[in-house]
Image (tube, helix red, strand yellow):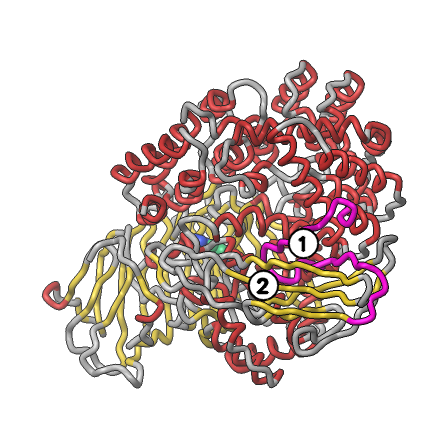
Amino acid sequence: MNAAVEVFRKDYRAPDYAVENVDLDFDVRDRTTVVSVLRIRRNGQARADAPLHLDGRGFELLELAIDGLAVAEANVERDDERLLIKQALPQAFSLRVVTRLDPDSNHSLEGLYRSGPMLCTQCEARGFSRITYFPDRPDVLSRFKVRIEADAQRYPVLLSNGNRVEAGEAADGRHYAIWEDPFLKPCYLFALVAGDLGCVSDTYTTASGREVALQFYVDKGNEGRVPHALESLKKAMRWDEQVYGLEYDLDIYMVVAAREFNMGAMENKGLNLFNARFVLASPDTATDADYEGIESVIAHEYFHNWTGNRVTCRDWFQLSLKEGLTVFRDQNFSADLNGADVQRIGEVRQLRTLQFAEDAGPMAHPVRPDSYVEINNFYTATVYEKGAEIVRMLQTLLGRETFIKGVQHYLREHDGSAATIEDFLAAHEAVSGRNLEGFRRWYSQAGTPTVGIDDEYHLLAHTYTLHLEQSTPATPGAPDKKPVPIPIRVAFFDGEGQRIHLPAQPPLMPAPDLILLEDAQATITFEDVKVRPTPSFLQGFSAPVRLQFGYSSDQLVNLLLHESDGFARWEAVQRLMLNAFFELLSGPAGDDTQALLKGLQLLAAQHFDDKALLAELLRMPSESYLAGQLQPLDGEKLAAARDALRLRIAHALTGPLSVWATAAPEDQGAINVGRRALAGIASGYLAATRSTRILDLCRDRAGSDNMTLSYGALVALNDIDCPQREDAMAAFLSRWRHDALVLDKWFALQAGSAIGNGVERTAELLGHPDYVASPNRIRSVLGTFWRENLRAYHRADGSGYRLLAEQVLKLDKSNPQIASRLADGLLGWRGLAAPRDELLRAVLQRLVQQVASPDVSEKIHKALA
Ligand code: ARG
Ligand code: ZN
């Protein structure tokens, strides 16, 4: 068997053996010895001679015994990844496996590994089989009991899932703890921590009056940065009770912050493990955006306790069952807490930048994939964010109340088991009485649908007609696409921005504010329409589609000024900005640029209570978003046109921008968050004019004790080659060099800066005395470089591609998951302007010969196919 085999969803078979109990004993020394005793029972449907399949890799096997007798070599078949026991097995038996691990040299950060002062685990998706032989699949649910023994000085904190049932001293200055998890769980939710950590604790009283202990474990000295995460957790616990009627189910909830972590965080039962950047925050070290990120990731992992843990996934093809649903839940939580408009705009920006690009590239896959080579490659924007959009559409179609009942029904029906996306949809069908047959296609078809709309107004007849059509582009291996049901929220306005109310027309228009486009084409005619309407389509971004409509500039300015839906206003500016950007890409400023500037000037004259929304309306599209709009892509040209746009806006709005740039309060609090966002955006524009006054202001502000202000000022200076930038960056480095999370920001700024030779500078950053190869630092440097520094990354000599490829190759051996994330930057060669396409292809052709991990090689093979 080869490591890189393709797994297909259609090949799913229920497991032959159930593991009822898992008894683990971790003896932590220089190496860690793990004794695993499993109580196994053959499942009803299995043949009596069914072999026992176990997964395992990357450890030393010391013992393998069944009912106390060593398993004979002759009865075993094994390769690098698994082991098959073929001897005759009784219906129920015990399996004992003893393994030895070397966590200190495990740089994959999967299984048991070291992060600073602790040993910790990451098991999702298949990390548990790096610890011991086990059927490492999510549909095997067991009751876990864990004993950990370690040196009492070096590892005073010993944690695992569930309740601590016993603890005490052991010989030679060692101690132990025993943990029992009363809930059935798959092994990917197992977790263990042994470390020397600080602890911040609190309690939470559930709706039904049970007291839950909350404990946050962090590097010593960071305890003061825990309160925000702790408060976020309590808010999430309350929200899930109030909105979904879901209560926490154990007596203790623990969160551990790790310096080294491949992803954001992990929802292990009762013992979440977090990338420290999603736990630690204080006003001087974390930006307002960091605060929001923490709140949402804390909530996300908490919400998994029901959607993910109590009900888990049958197989990894169902990943979106827990991830799409849980992202949707955390998005709603954030919208309820911080305001729906800005939250939605952020979600759409992210979806369009990352997921639309993925869906248009060589790795395009359905939200429920049909096959994979490396499952870690499928923790994607498609599975997570598009998955959340599908759940949102379901809510739109069914109505919020029915939708919530559907989720509750699904949880009741499948509690304590492993379910499928089909089960989730069936629960909604049962509760609503609706048929979701066509809706299922959202899960099975890859590619972003396009909706094209034309309108026609008859002045004399007073009729207004909409022609709608949809199509989904071919994706690799899937040329033919069927229509999907697309909910399009609509509103209509007259030329002065007053709402026009047009009646519902079921079934195509089930409500006056909703079109449901189910077929490839549809037409709606409204009678008795006195003036030509300005339509606002896709309010709230009601479906993950590209919507094409020939808006005039006047219509867009109308929407920008008068729409009440925040997303729709933002979308109107985005369209104006894109039109201007394309104009500047190919020549001097003309009508489109004038229309944008005029619109922004009118916007600036309006009164805004929601400063955060105003900031979003003014923010320019990112380089990576623009990259998705430009085929073939010339990154240098793109960056130059974007710079020109920035400068135009700065000159047209100097007055209001100067006011906003100076109103930059340091105090926390929702109103000030908006003001700071606005100040950051405004100084970014103004800095482009190189006015000494603003450059000085930014340099001074970079020394602020409020990280949002400090970082915002550095962002504003970052593309301007001036002494103020040099001074501010140097001061920031020397102030924060001891603080890894803040230092990540400095590295990201350097890698993203437009000045000088960005390729050379990025290469130098990798050799900088303060550089360490932690996942966060790698992402700060190389992730920022390829995603947000298009001028450097896409240099016509190909040096940017070679730099990224070298690093991918280097990481391919130590940490394939991180290597594979970075490799995303190398996949889109087909969309590049010559000679870059061929340069990048040549880089890929060399790389594909050299990489070893299934993670990177799956992606490169698909990119070259
Ligand atoms: N389940 C985690 C979450 O909350 C992500 C774990 C991803 N792990 C991985 N190896 N891909 O989204
Ligand atoms: Zn998740």
At label 1, the amino acid type is Leu
Question: In this image, 242 relative to 363: left or right?
Answer: right
Expressed as whole percent of the image width and height from the top left, the position of residue 76 reads: 15, 65
Question: From the viewer's perspective, is residue 413 above or below residue 573?
Answer: below
Residue 169 visible: no
State the extent of the magenta-drawn residues as a range. Answer: 527-556
Task: Using a 10 Å C-alpha cutoff, classify the residue at mark 2 as few (fewer than 14 neighbours), some (14 to 19) or many (20 or more).
Answer: some
How many numbered callouts? 2
Q: Is residue 304 above or below residue 222?
A: below
Q: Is residue 454 left or right of residue 463?
A: left
Is residue 534 on the magenta stretch?
yes
Q: Amino acid at mark 2?
A: Glu
Residue visible at 55% across and 28% down in the picture: 637
Q: Would residue 134 appear left or right of 277 to someone viewing this image?
A: left
The residue under label 1 is 230
Q: For mark 1, give the secondary structure.
A: helix
Q: Quadrant of residue 630?
A: top right
Seen at 35% across and 68% down, the residue is: 9
Is residue 33 inside the magenta stretch? no
Mark 1 burial class by Cα count in 10 Å: few <14, some 14-19, many 20+: many
Question: Where's the N terminus, which quadrant?
Answer: bottom left
Residue in view at x 37 percent, y 67 percent: 23
Q: CA distance from mark 2 to mark 1?
A: 48 Å
**Residue tagged by mark 2?**
469
Image coordinates of residue 647 in percent, x first then y, are 71, 26
Report x, y in % for residue 268.
50, 61
The residue closer to the viewer here, 348 or 407, is: 348
Secondary structure of the residue carrying tag 2 is strand
State the image coordinates of residue 722 (x, y, percent, origin top left). 67, 15
Q: Nearer the viewer, residue 96 or 339?
A: 339
